[in-house]
Every structure is written in C-alpha cells, then in structure tokens.
Image: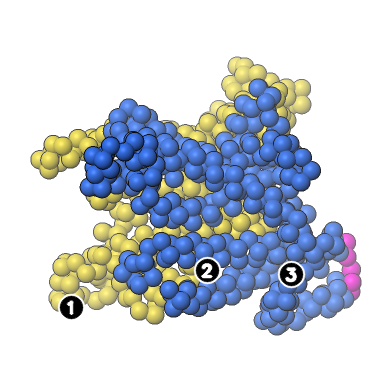
Amino acid sequence: MLSFIARRLLYLLPVLLAVSLLTFLIASLLPGDLAYVILGDQATPEKVAALRHDMGLDEPVWWRYLSWLGHVLEGDFGRSFRTGQTVLQAVGERLPVSFELMFFAEIAGLAIGVPVAIACAVRSGGAFDRFMTGSAFGMLSVPTFLSAILLIYLFAVELRWLPATGYVPFGEDPMANLRFMVLPALTLALAEWPGIMRVLRSDMIATLQEDYIALAKAKGLKASRILFVHALKPSSLTLITITGINIGRLIGGAVIVETIFALPGIGRLLVGAIYTRDLIILQGVVLVVAGGFVLMNFVVDMLYAVLDPRIRHGHA
Amino acid sequence: MATLELVIDEDVASGPVTRTRRLGPLFWAAVGWTIFILAAAASAGLLPLPSPTDMDMLERRAAPSVLHWLGTDGLGRDELARLIFGARVSLTVGLCGPVIGLTIGGALGMLSGYFRGRFESLVVGSMDVLLAFPPLILALAVTAYLGQSLLNLTCILGVLGIPAFMRVARAATLTLARREFVIAAQALGATHARILLRELLPNVLLPLLAFFLLGVAVTIVAEGALSFLGLGVPPPISSWGSMIGEGRESLEIAPRLAFMPAIAMFLTVLSFNLIGDTLRALTDPRQGAL
C-alpha cells in the first residue's frame, strides 16, 4: 500500500508542476499585457514601461515563472490590483460556499440516482425501467444553465416557493441559507443523477444474479435489506468512480450555477475576475481549482485502492 | 434510448440469424431534426427572414405575428431570425470544434497505440495535464485572455476535446494492432504508414465517428454555457446560449424568449446524443449487449 501511494505521489508531482506551468503560460504568453490592463488604454508608453519594470514583466518568461512558482510555494498567490485582496483571502472566503453547493448537489444526485437505479434493476426491461432509462438519457442532453432557468421559472417565478437568487451565510441564518441552496443544488443534482443511475443500474442487474443474493432471499431477508445493503455493497467502487469522474463536470456546473443564482462561490469569483479583467485573481483561482481537482482525483484513486486490493497490486 | 435497448433485446432473443438491426422511429426523428436544423442554418442568408440584428424599439417583446412569426426579443429583434442565425453559431462551433479533436486526438491516439514506448508515455502524460483542468474552467480562462471570437471559441473547445478522442483512438488501436490482419500486413513487409492508413484507420474510424457525434453534443452545450455567461461570440451576433442568457432577464414577463432557444438547443443536443449513442452501440457489440 505504501509503495502504491509513493508511486502515485511521484506521478502527482510532475502533473502539478505542468498544471502550474500551463496556468502561468496562459496568463503570460497570450495577448493582453497586464500593465495595459491596470493602467488602461490611455496610458503613456513611459508609464507602462515603468510599471512593467516594477512588476518584473520585462524579465524573461522562464525567470518570471520560477519566481512566481517560488511565491506560490510560499503561499503567496498574489494580490488583486482592483480590490487589493490577496488571492488566498478571496478564495478562502468563497470556497466554503462552493463546497456546500457541491456537497448538497452530490447528496441530492445520489438520493435521486441510487433508488431509481435499484428500482430499475429489480424489474429491468419493465415499463418503469424503460421510462427512467429514457428520462436519464434525455436529462443528459439538458445543459445546467437550461435546467437552472426551468427551475427558477417553476419554483421562483410561477409558484414563488423559493428565492431565485441570493445568499445568506450559514452562520447567520441556517434556514435562510438552506432555502437559498435548494434550487442551485437541485440544478446540479439534475445533471448528476443520470450518470449515477445509468452506471449503477447495469452494475446492479449483474449483481442481482449472483448466488449470494439468491442465498439472502432464501434466508428470508427483507427485500429492502437485500437491495440496499447486500446488493449495493459491491457497487460502492462504481459509485466512487462516478463521483470521481463527475468532479470536473460538477466544478464547471458550479461556475454556471453560482453565476445564475448569485452565490458568492469560487465560480462567481472566477467569472467576475474575467469580466473585470482581474488577471491575478483569475490566474490564482485557475491554479487553486486545477490543483484541487488533481488532488481530489488523487484521493479518489487512493480510496479506490483501499477498497479494491487488486488495483494496488496491479492486477486490475 | 428506450427503443434502442428494446431493439437489442430482440436481437439477442432471436439469435444471430436476423442480421438487420432496426433503428427505431426515435433515431430517424433525431436524424430528421438534425438535417432540418443544419439546412436552416446553412441557408439562413437565403431565407426570406427579417434581419436578426435590426432593432425596433416600438415592437419590444412583441407577441408572434405575421411580420414576426415567433415575436420579437427585448430589443425588438426578430426572434425566428435570431434563432436560425443563432443555430449557425452553435452548429459551426459544435461541428468544427470536434473536427479539431477528431483529427489531432485521433492521430495522436493511433500513433501512440501503434508505436507504444516513449511516444505513448509522452502523449498520455500531456493529455493527463490537459485533463487536470476542469474543462469549463480552462475554456473560460483561455477565452478571457484570447478574446471572444468565433474562431477562438472553436479552437479552444476543439483542443479541449483532444484527450477524449485520443483515448478512444488509442484504445481501439491497441486491440487492433495485435490482430491477425495487421500481423499479416507486417509479415508482407508493409510500411508503418501503410499499416496505419490502410489497415488500422478504416477500423478505428467508425468508433471515432460515433464518438464525434457525442462530441458535437458536448461542444454545443459548452458553447452555450460560455455564450450564456456572456463569454461566447460577441454581440450583436446571436447564439442559442446568449439568447437564453438574454431571455433570463425577462423570465417573468416573456418566458418564451428563454424557452424557445432552450428547446431548439435541447432537441439538437438530444438528437446528436441519440444518433451518436446508437452508432456507438452498433460499432461496439459488447457495450450494446449490456
């Protein structure tokens, strides 16, 4: 197990390094000089040259990358030249909101996907199974921003049950916070459950034909216990895999959902930084999100190896 | 999907005797819609439509009429014309982006699956770096720096598709390269180029094309998301995503302004998904049997 972790960690380092390089290159090599952005179009060439010198923009690219990476490793991701806030402060404030959103979205996605998958697998080929398989396929074609608008129209405009946009911190008023979270989390969950359901369903159909399920039935165990405990257990690997694969899409979806529902999360920070051309914040957020994404995938890999010994011994 | 699975069940039940696979009415409906929307987008300039950018401030959010078949939007522009010209943008990006992924990713995948060794490690490693970014985040960041234009949008979304196409092509090549007909060609002294182009490519192309159609669906959604956020093609050019974004502002007064482009986009994405999934099931018998 230790050697497996060591091997994966060794692979992680070059990937993280390459991610930081790519993030830096996107920000430095593409058109749009930072000095011009800060000073505006009216700036005199002398002023721009002076600022470029101050910020070290006239140094060679590889040197700027190394010094930037050095600062990042010391925990200094830079500071917004618009608000004066450091990247870490801005990200730290916004991260809990995004985590809360993604947590509820994943829970809701599982809460819809798992029971539906089980119900479909029990009578595979039946009317309910065909209807839900069809719906899941249809839902895969509904973009996040589309279901968001549909939910806003239904629950906020027509029925007026829930607020369309806004946010209250959980610490201030937990109930209000949850009310603001329902629609955004549900929007993301609508994109999550089809994937969960489709994979779990085919997994489950195979599991239900195993001998030990027949044995459990013969022992007279309750159907709900057989389905939710005995039959679901071997699918735990599958569920972790889908969750891992979904993280990337979930982050992308969170960007859109946070923008639509005006949630002050990391995605809105990113989009806001793009609108105001706050390049330092943009660069920092991309690095934090991509780095976090790589680490999360690493954790999923580890979980996988813990649950299935064949993987860490390379027999998979 | 439902019809698709039914068809396969019948095939299994009746054994290998019946070779023809019925594709079902849903599949043909999807093909029909795709052809319709492609034709409308291609002939947008020739159709007797009002201009999609001419504003009429007296006719804002007007109901459907003889003059404006689907009414007008928040700036008094003809909704039908904007829908059809919007299809142009969505479909141009949606079709051209995956072509980039198909050619570059397909070539890289075949070469790495055939030659293996260091080259394969290098390709797979660099694709891992590209996959280390959540796709939408990378697309947002790069458009922010490169600037918003149809060409930039297509290129970015195309490049983002390369890893997926690479994986499909590599997986197919890996299994095919060990088959008898490839070994026979090698024994006959065929060059690498000949084996790759004449023996492997025809076999890899079919799964790649099925995947291409799924890629079109994903790219249309991604373009829609970027345009919805106001980071797609710059106004006044319409795209389905930007129309939905504008329609969101008037959800309480005129919900149809958001829902009409939404329905168009949903049907198009669904159609490409359906066609792609059907073809994938046909080209990959193992998956179809599930």
Looking at the rendered structure, which numbered label has been put on residue B189?
1
Please give the name of the residue rendered at 18% of the width and 40% of the height, measured from the top-left corner.
Answer: B12
Which subunit holds the residue at mark 1?
A: B
Rendered view: A146 above or below A303: above
Q: How is the image coloured?
A: by chain
Q: Which amino acid does label 2 sit on?
A: Val
Residue under circle 3?
A: A77
Quarter of image, res B169: bottom left
- Of tags 1 and 2, the one toward the viewer is 2
Secondary structure beneath label 2: helix
Colour in which chain B is drawn: yellow
Please give the name of the residue rendered at 34% of the width and 32% of the height, measured from the top-left corner.
Answer: A130
Q: Give the range drawn in magenta.
A: A41-47
Residue A217 percent coordinates (x, y): 26, 39
Residue A41 percent coordinates (x, y): 84, 61
Q: For this view, does B144 lie left or right of residue B99?
A: right
Colour in which chain A is drawn: blue
